[in-house]
Image (spheres, rainbow, N blue to C red):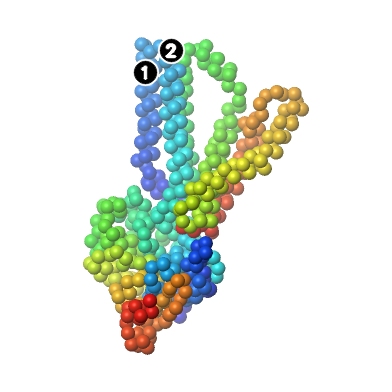
Amino acid sequence: MMTLLKYEIYRRWRWLVLRYVALIIIGIILLNRVASPAYQNEFIGESIGKFIFASLVIFIIVIVEGINMLKEDLFEECGYLTFTIPKKGRTVLASKLVLLFLQLSFWTMISIGFGSILFSKLPYHEIVQIETQINFYLFPTVLFILTAFFNFVLMVHFSLTLTKTLLVNKRYSSLLSTGIFFFLIYFIEKVYYGPFLNQLNHVSIEIGSRSNINLLSGGYTAVFLNIILTAIFFTATAYLLENKINI
Amino acid sequence: MEQILKATQLSKYFYQKKALNKVDINIEKGNIYGILGPNGGGKSTFLKIAAGLLKPSQGEITIDNEKPGVYTKSIVSYLPENNYLYRWMKIKDALNFFKDLYNDFDFEKARESIKFMELEEGEKVTSLSKGMMGRLKLTLALSRKAKLYLLDEPLNGIDPISREKIITSILDSYSEKASILICSHLIYYIEKLLDYVFFLSEGRIILSGNAEELRNKRGMSIDKLFQEVF
């Protein structure tokens, strides 16, 4: 897997470096502006907003690339090379997901690093006010978002791979894979998360809580459900890649 | 002779179209085989199934007694018709990629072959002409010490100079331990290479046999026979 990972990085290293250097430069420029004595407090919030926007743009690029990493191999001619190397489907898929994880880690480090420095420049009373508004448990929430992110990417990967199992040509592939993806979302919502949310609602009513119930309220149980789903989609996609796809 | 590939009643359907229709092919070690036929006859489909890129709709195919999978990919060297190399690659990247991912890749042989083919290792694959790309793909495919080589239209769109180099390379790569299966509709150029031929049309084998025996029996070259049959 490490060899494939090496080539996944080598294949796109210029873009990888470019996007993170761009985010770091934006962060440094905003920090410089905020650090200036002439800079007024009300503009600190604006700088934080600008940084969050830049960070979100990079995040979307990471997701799109995470999806395209497999899509290119499935639908472009380079798939002839990728799928004739003597590697298992799970190895091919894992190499792409590990790169995605590394990218996400870089993005998180840079975003949290600059974000927290910018945040600390706010007046003390505003920091306290914002902190009191945050009423969620940080660790399970981060784990939930991380697993949900991989669920999302793997669901797209699974939809694309299933499409390539059912169709050989590209003509209707986008339509079919989009259809499969939305069907999966609907199905999982109804059959997988639905009963869990009902249970949470039931418990919430029992204990007299009036708070809004969503998957984040599920804490580690929701994270566990996400991990199971990730494992299912990873296994199914790897199986299709190795045994069923038509390139 | 030991068999390296065996296809039994192999069929592949694309919706209503039968790309392959109950094809039986046996490939023995140490020979060069030609699957010959017009475009759209099912030649590439057969090779893609053998390379593990397509799954058969019916029938069975085994390579070294295994169904196409990770093991067969490690002993089969496949040269597709299209430009399958990653666009970011330079020639030297392609050599390194093959060295890293195929245990049987002979890096030194590949470098020598690159010189013979008059290619430069620093060139980007996207800047290569069709002839140069054909020579590079063949270098990569034949620099593996594979048990079975699958060459899909290795001469298609290739200029006469490149064509000679490619034929020389194929002959140099011949070994009694390996088999070569060439798909082509340019029979004239590859005829001298072939020990056995299969004529494939509309997914069916309509004629097959030892090339020399067919020539003697019909009193004409395989190329002429091809023109007569199709």
Q: Secondary structure at mark 1?
A: helix
Q: Quick check: A217 above or below B166? A: above
In the rendered structure, which amino acid carries the disc numbered 2? Asn
- Count of numbered marks: 2
Quadrant into which the N terminus of chain B falls: bottom left
Q: Position of residue A52 (x, y in %)?
A: 45, 26
Q: According to the image, label 2 marks what residue?
A: A41
The residue located at (32%, 80%) in the rendering is B224
Quadrant into which the C terminus of chain B falls: bottom left
Give how far apart the Cα atoms at labels 2 and 1 are: 11 Å
Q: According to the image, label 1 marks what residue?
A: A33
Query: Which circle marks residue A97 in the picture?
Result: none
The residue located at (40%, 11%) in the rendering is A40
The residue located at (32%, 71%) in the rendering is B186
Q: Position of residue B49 (x, y in %)?
A: 47, 65
Q: Chain of mark 2?
A: A
Q: Could one spot residue A22 in this view of the protein?
A: yes
Q: Nearer the viewer, residue B111 or B83?
A: B83
Q: Residue furthest right?
A: A206
Along the polypeptide, which appears first: circle 2 or circle 1?
Answer: 1
In the rendered structure, which amino acid carries the disc numbered 1? Arg
| Dot 2 crowding, Cα within 10 Å, few <14, some 14–19, many 20+ | few
Q: Chain of mark 1?
A: A
Q: Secondary structure at mark 2?
A: loop
Q: Position of residue B94 (x, y in %)?
A: 34, 55
